[in-house]
Image: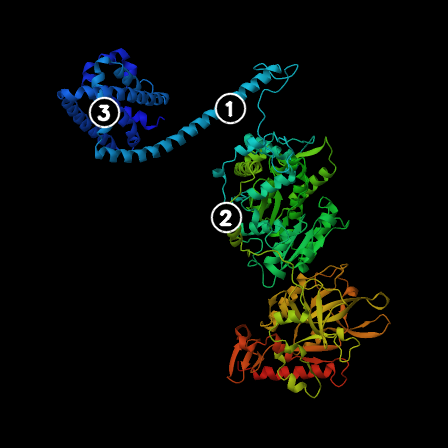
Amino acid sequence: MRSNSDESDYENESFINTDHDESIEEKRTDSSFFSDYSTNEKHKKKTNHFIYTTLSDETSDLNESDCNEDYYSSNEHNNTSINICINDSSDCDDKIRTRKKRKNEDTYHYNKKQKLHEDSGDEGSSQNINNISINDPSSNDEEDIRIEKNIYEDSYHYNKRQKIHKIKNKIENDISDKNNFNVNEELNKQESKNLNTDKVKRMMKKMGYKEGYGLGKNKQGRLEPVEASKQHGRRGLGHNIPGLEASSLKWDPAEEEIKCKEDMEWIKNSNKNLPTKEEMHFWLQIGPKKMTIDDETQFCHEDIVRNIINSKTVFDNLDDVEFRRARTRSNPYETIRGAFFLNRAAVKMANIDRACNFMFTDRKHLGKNELLYFADVCAGPGGFSEYVLWRTKWHAKGFGFTLKNENDFKLADFYAGSPETFHPYYGPKDNGDVFDSENQRTFRELIMKYTHNKGVHFMMSDGGFSVEGKENLQEILSKQLYLCQCLVALMIVREKGHFVTKLFDIFTPFSAGLIYLMYRCFDEICIFKPNSSRPANSERYLICKSKRPGTEIVMQYLNKINHLLLDSDENNDVIQLVSFDELEKEKQFLQYLRTSNEYLGKKQIIGLCKIAAFCEDNTLVETKQADMRKECLAYWKLPDESRTIPKHMKPKDKLNILVKDSTFLSNFATTLKVDNINNLLNSPYDWFCMPCSTKLQPDDERKNATFYMSMGRSNVYRYLKYGWVEVSDINIELPSNTLVYAEVVHEMKREFRHQQKVLALHIIDAFILGGEDVSQKYLRERHELTKKFCEALWKPEGSNYARVRAKELFPVNSDICEKLQIKERRMKNNCPALVYELPETSLHYDQNCDDKLYFIPNSIIFLRSTVNPWNRYVSKTHRTTYVFNYKTNENLFDKNRPRSAEANFIESFKNRVIWYWPSDKSLTMNIFAKFIKDKCNITLQNGLSY
């Protein structure tokens, strides 16, 4: 066997390359070499070398030096033995004959060993040299002697070394066997492969195969190898989506910008005047309807337009499910979803509002107790409105306008906001079509009437419709929707009000001109794509800040355009609203529009390529989704909560959450009589009163004043002697977590046969309004908040819900009888009755005298606004009220009134007084009026010194 160490051993010998550089004959003539060492000695050396070769492998130079030392020492000893044998002539003859016999035997065994060694592959090495020595007759005698010496005269050290080398040789031989086996195995595989290849070639040749041609009779078979399967998900085998793989390769993660806070670029309107009617008429262009978008490059670089279209087209043949899954995995903001709101639109509005520094929902710019009015157009199911109502609670009043039925507002799903203060409207045709000019007009009238002819503080619109199969034409197909949303905004938004609307691509002259007109009607505009809007779509928002006065001329122009679009056909369509020459004059605006389009276009292309990459590789994931959800919700000031259905609770359990101590609910009012009026109303300025319909002995207990608690929408309960009972006799809506002291009243209008009655809920005082605890506020503050609360809950006539109204609160003073406005009206049975007329408000449809609302009072409830030891008086010098502490003699004007002087809800409720007038014949209105007047004069005189 030939070990791996053989070659390394021979490399140290002087004759390693003799087989290649010299012939065999040259070796035979080298007398100096063979004269020093006999043939047997060479055999001994070669044999020893074969044994020790495993030591030298590539491990230690020391082993090689040991072998050389042994070789030379043995050589010297053998030479000495041969000389002695030759000098002893008497013994040599016998020994020579014996040795010749041995020589023949040893030569046989030696040749056998050499034959084995030759078979191991060491060709032309020791075997050839030894054969030359043995066949040489001139050296046979010396060879006999040396063989004998080498066989029988081994030293002790040699035997010890021999044992060690045998062990190491065995180890190296095992390693060599393993390596040789691996090499042989590879060779066998290669040979098998070659045999199989040859076999296949022979088979192909029999079938008529020629290199460069396909199989078959006409050599029509395929030449290319069958590709590996690229099947993805639910795609069919072999289904190929053109351009998808190429698009995926264009995605570069380094190009994507992922951050929580977006950059906003506003452009200010530098024009002092609005465009004139004549100018706009000159700008208008009518022409054939255009149904291509790829050549619209006036407002965006043509490469970006082309890449956007091509990137969208790639997904035309992709399965919707696969596309949505890849989109969900690739969008870094996807896991935000709708947060705890109805849908994603709510989060978009939260994102936009925060980016604008809460420009829409911040109530700091409003007057005291002024409602925030807003409109939500083309926005079903109402995510925008739900966000606004969540942010502002019941302090905002919303007007909705959208298509009815399947696209309607889903108020029942407004879990976060208060849908009770939102009023959807669908126009006289009851369809909610925003293209209909009659619907637009009546919607404007409704809003102006109920916003005191001012309009809403801001309007939102999020209109869109399916363009499946025509995604590249979305802008052209949405042009009238763009226009009508902007038109309605100019109709209903008040001066200094704001507007936000959804757009898609802005490549056509029509879209660019519309944005230019809005730019001229507002102080500033911004084209903005929030993070909550998926980066791969063309969605963006136009934000208009601070509406300018005098925009009616532009509103009329857009109204005219809408009529033209309603009557348009293939040959007559509105191509542009503003001429390109006019836009070129506004270099600032034109540059802003182009920069915005190109920036958002590049962002969209990156998003589309990323989706393509995620479609091709299902293992790709966006690792920043969790971090972006956490950071964005915190930045937008939204709690990181899940959407949950409100928990249904029993009224008693709900009351325990709202009120810590509910024992005051069972307190009865003190009845005012002629014999206790002096004690109860001794300081009239401490009291406020209001007319009520509560009776001393009611026919129906439900009609008397009591507590009403709401769990949301029409889930309202009334407190009676035997506990909480659901309200069923009147259809009312109150925001969740509301607790008020109120009564049900029959409101009437007209007289005699034309008299009409409706039920209404009149709130006397409030403890909690829509989750806001007002019980610790001053009585007048609670009343003002209650009025605001009821105005937000307003429902127009014709709705299914009863009106919720706040009682009028009158201070008790010398002219109390005039303020109560007690008049006589004829009832349906033609009998006269004393009634109290409700004050006129802008929320009444008819302002005729006969249509004033009124009800029949059965009592007057008095609520005290101060608490002992404080009383209120009037200063004759300053003609204003002040409070006085009769224990400490401290007096302060009402505007500096300490909190300790004000009665909270529970104190006012416990100390309330009720006068059952006019059924109490002993205490008439005249007696009451005279008493109050006298007390007020005395109080005024006592306050002269202050």
User: Which amino acid, mark 2?
Assistant: Lys
User: Which amino acid, mark 3?
Assistant: Glu
Q: Nearer the viewer, mark 1 or mark 3?
A: 3
- Tell me the distance, in whole angstroms, between the alpha carbons under discs 3 and 2: 99 Å
Residue at numbered disc 2: 261
- Examine the rendering and report whether any part of residue 274 can be seen: no
Q: Which of pointers 2 and 1 lies earlier in the amino acid sequence?
A: 1
* Left or right of residue 233: residue 560: right
Say how the picture is coloured: rainbow
Residue found at x 76% / y 71%: 855
Name the residue at the left extreme: 87
- Tell me the distance, in whole angstroms, between the alpha carbons under discs 1 and 3: 52 Å
Q: Nearer the viewer, mark 2 or mark 1?
A: 1
Residue at numbered disc 3: 148
Which quadrant is home to the N terminus?
top left
- From the top left corner, tell me how far across and down residue 373 is, in percent: 63, 56
In terms of secondary structure, where does tag 1 sit? helix
